[in-house]
Amino acid sequence: MKKQLLITLTAVMSIKSAFALTLPPVPTEPIYFEPPIVQAEPQTRSLSCYQIDNAINQLHPYRYTYKPDYFNDGTNKLATALVVFDSIPIVEGWLGLGYLGYSALVSEKEDRRQLHIEQEIAALQRVKAEKHCYE
């Protein structure tokens, strides 16, 4: 009886360890886009305070996006309608899905462009602070 119990316990323990879950390693590197920090160039450091202000003012219009967001873009609404209501046997909504992917790609590119401009402005403002302009 004891021998049979020992064999059963050994079998249960080996089965339990066979089904043990091992967690995958946690990634330490970032999985999302991290923008590099823009450093001021040497020629930027040689500018006067007035010239730095002019450079910042010239970059301000590029801080903003003129692309409508997803829900205000009429073309995205049309592409969504194509996906939902498309009955053409060849296309079957792929045209709408393709445009929605393209629209997301353009939005991502626009976000990265804006981020780059923001970083350039921040670099110019850091140079301006280092020079103690207008104190």
Image (spheres, helix red, strand yellow):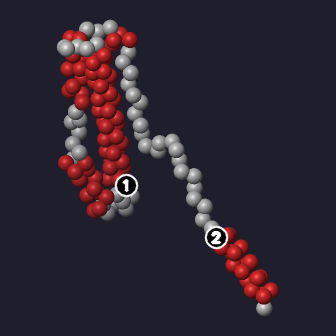
Q: Spatial distance from mark 1 to mark 2, Cα to Cα? A: 42 Å
The structure residue drawn at horizontal position 28% and vertical position 62%, both measured from the top left corner, is 85
Query: In the image, which is nearer the foreground, mark 1 or mark 2?
Result: 2
Earlier residue among tags 1 and 2: 2
Q: Is residue 53 above or below residue 106?
A: above
Q: Secondary structure at mark 1?
A: helix
The structure residue drawn at horizontal position 72% and vertical position 80%, both measured from the top left corner, is 9
In front of the other: 67 or 89: 67
Residue holding disc 1: 94
Q: Is residue 27 above or below residue 60?
A: below
The numbered disc on residue 67 is none
In front of the other: 20 or 4: 4
In front of the other: 127 or 107: 127
In the rendered image, which quarter contains the N terminus? bottom right
- Snapshot quadrant of residue 44: top left
Would residue 47 be seen by someone viewing this image from the given angle? yes
In the rendered image, which quarter contains the C terminus? top left
Which amino acid type corresponds to the residue marked 2 in the rendered image? Phe
The structure residue drawn at horizontal position 39% and vertical position 58%, both measured from the top left corner, is 90
111 with respect to 8 (left or right): left
Give how far across and how far down residue 27 sits, in percent. Answer: 53, 47
The numbered disc on residue 19 is 2
Give how far across and how far down residue 19 sits, in percent. Answer: 64, 70
Q: Secondary structure at mark 2?
A: loop
Would residue 124 be seen by someone viewing this image from the given angle? no
Which amino acid type corresponds to the residue marked 1 in the rendered image? Trp
| Number of marks drawn | 2
Q: Callout 1 environment at 10 Å: few (<14), some (14 to 19), or many (20+)?
A: some
